Image (cartoon, helix red, strand yellow):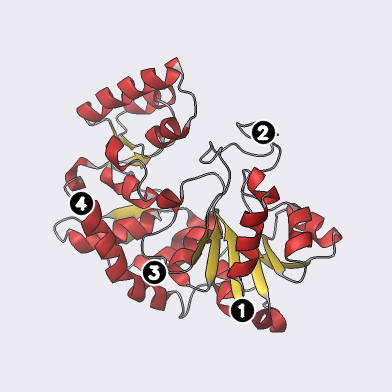
Amino acid sequence: MRLLSFYAVQGLKDDLKFEIVVPAFLRKLAEHTFGDRLTIAHDDLKSDYYFTNLGMKDLLKGILSGKKYISPYQRAVIHDRKKKRIKDYVNILAFNVADWLGLVQVPKWRWIEKYQGYLDVIGLKRIRNISYEEFQNQLHTDYPKISAKLKTDVPISSELLIPEDLKENVLVYPTGTSRQFIPVWWAKKHLPDAYFAFFINDSDAETFKEMGLKIIHFFKEPGDIIALSHSAKWTISTDSFPSHLLQSATNKCAITITEVLKSRVISPAFEGKIVDSQVNCHPCLHLERKAHPVCAAGYKECLNWKNQIYSANITKSAN
């Protein structure tokens, strides 16, 4: 969503030129999709600004060495926390001062429930004059062009194998490091005939396979995720990395929302289906499953997975 947003901003600001460092595994897809406007740089480039999700204490060393940061997440975390702590108010003050000094730039509070891609870019003072309406309009303008690119010659891994019968079946990306991960019992009960796609090194795939569910592996090229979706009858994805690719690649897709506000994680240009959270504790904080056995509300699995309306909305999306 960050590249998508910089692409939109570049369409609005001809006088600026963005050179963006992306992880190596994303480079081919980024150049294929956004290279006509953005310069996709190698990871050895010294950047003017670095995106961060760290607190101020952890940024001090970098600041003292001359680095400057963009922090679009810190305020979103504080906003979503049900009970504020003294630490949160100290962080707010520290980031306000750092933003005023130009050391750590942050988005204004009034945008905190808007699309995360906008929060990513609007922290930069030089482009804060772009209104959310202008930004949304540009996303809609760019969508047909980007979608067309993601249907043609998308870089994929040589190892990728697409089952012949995938075109007759639902494809599911059940992944997620937090509670958005689809429990295997839910998958077996509600989508027993679907294909479930996992990264080749994801050990959770074996649990699904042991339950008799059909498994597909994707590999290092993120284009694999897109290619599989284009081959499927319908795609369902949790709010995880695959969903951010799919929102620009296809409308034959449903995105399930568990912890984060849909207004923040769904592109305004996405025309597929959104299965919104049905539980009172939404939104909640992102807590990695293995490091945090229970969520902030004290549950091992998101309550949405036991909610009949939520489950029905997912299964109905594919019909």
Mark toward the viewer: 4 or 2: 4
Mark 3 to mark 4: distance in Å?
24 Å
**Can residue 159 be seen here?**
no
Q: CA distance from mark 2 to mark 1?
A: 36 Å
| Secondary structure category for the residue under label 3 | helix
Q: Which residue is mark 2?
A: 291
Q: Secondary structure at mark 2?
A: loop
Which percent across, then down, holds residue 125? 20, 41
Q: Position of residue 247 (x, y in %)?
A: 46, 64
SS at badge 4: loop
Residue 112 falls in image quadrant? top left
**Observer able to see residue 13:** yes
Work out which residue is located at the far front of the displayed protein and give it. Answer: 309
Residue underneath mark 1:
233
What amino acid is labelled 3 in the image?
Thr
Choose the circle earlier in sequence order: 1 or 4.
Answer: 4
Q: Amino acid at mark 4?
A: Ser
Q: Nearer the viewer, residue 167 or 55?
A: 167
> Disc 4 designates what residue?
131
Of tags 3 and 4, the one toward the viewer is 4
Please identify the quadrant where the N terminus is shown. bottom left
First of labels 3, 4 by sequence position: 3
- In three-dimensional space, the C-alpha distance between marks 4 and 2, rounded to whole angstroms, equals 39 Å
Are the residues flagged by discs 2 and 1 in contact, CB closer than 8 Å? no
Q: Which residue is mark 3?
A: 33
